[in-house]
Amino acid sequence: MPHFAAGVVRFQTEVFPEKQELFESLAKGQSPEALFITCSDSRIETAMITQTEPGELFICRNAGNIVPPHTQQTGGMTASIEFAVAALKVPHIVVCGHTECGAMKGAMNLAGLDGLPHVREWLGYTRAAVEVVNQIGADLDDADKMNLLLEQNVILQLNHLKTHPSVAARMAAGELQLHGWVYDIRTGDVKAYDAASETFIPVHEHYASEMAAIALAKHECPA
């Protein structure tokens, strides 16, 4: 804890003064660009990966970056999704999985989770992805099976998102886009799901046109 306390002091004395104007504006409210759903894994640092400032991402984290399908039972994820989509009006939702995910390893071996009953039940929301891997990835080695599961789980959670009324409504109105990412801890690579090809491709390829448009706008309108 002394390490964390020292970090707080450094934030208060060095970081905050440099960004005081930003924090003063954030004290009046928030308008994030995206709801970012990712794993609780301590190795995932959302601001570092996306190079975003406070106020740009509304973040939900849990074991396995899971989105339970909508039901009448209220839960933390359901409430957070509803608030981000219906109240904050985020235009984007990202579901971001990652390599070396303990939750996904557990999903492939639920029998090994007898001492973690709540974790085992939670990972039931990945069952369809596991079944897909068992069906189409039977001949793959363990590493390739896991990579396939990471991707299939992201796709599954995107489908779960569409069952949430607020998400379905704003998607139907053309006001909300869903994105699926997988982050590689070892290499730093991030791949995005491309619905047209039903594959994951590097983010710089998937968003090439959008990034080019932003770069052009900055060139034409220099700060």
Image: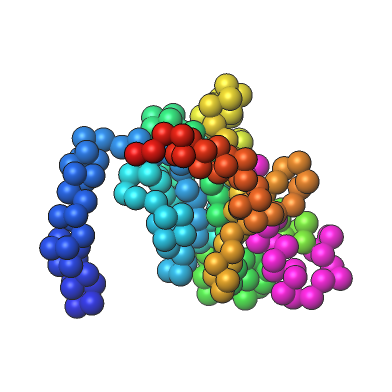
| Residue 200 at x, y percent in the picture | 70, 54
Residue 62 shows up from this direction? no
Q: Quadrant of residue 152?
A: bottom right
Task: Please indicate whether residue 100 sits to the left or right of residue 152 in the image.
Answer: left
Q: What colouring does the structure picture have?
A: rainbow
| Residue 6 at x, y percent in the picture | 18, 73
Q: Is residue 86 above or below residue 32?
A: above
Answer whether residue 143 is magenta in the image: yes
Q: Nearer the viewer, residue 211 or 11?
A: 211
Residue, far bottom: 2
Image quadrant where one finds the C terminus: top left
Q: Which residue occupies 53% across, 64% down?
A: 119
Answer whether residue 1 is magenta in the image: no
Query: Which portion, as a residue range, is magenta?
Result: 134-161
Q: Which residue occupies 86% across, 71% down?
A: 139
| Residue 19 at x, y percent in the picture | 21, 51
Residue 50 shows up from this direction? yes
Q: Which residue occupies 42% across, 61% down?
A: 48
Q: Nearer the viewer, residue 100 or 53?
A: 53
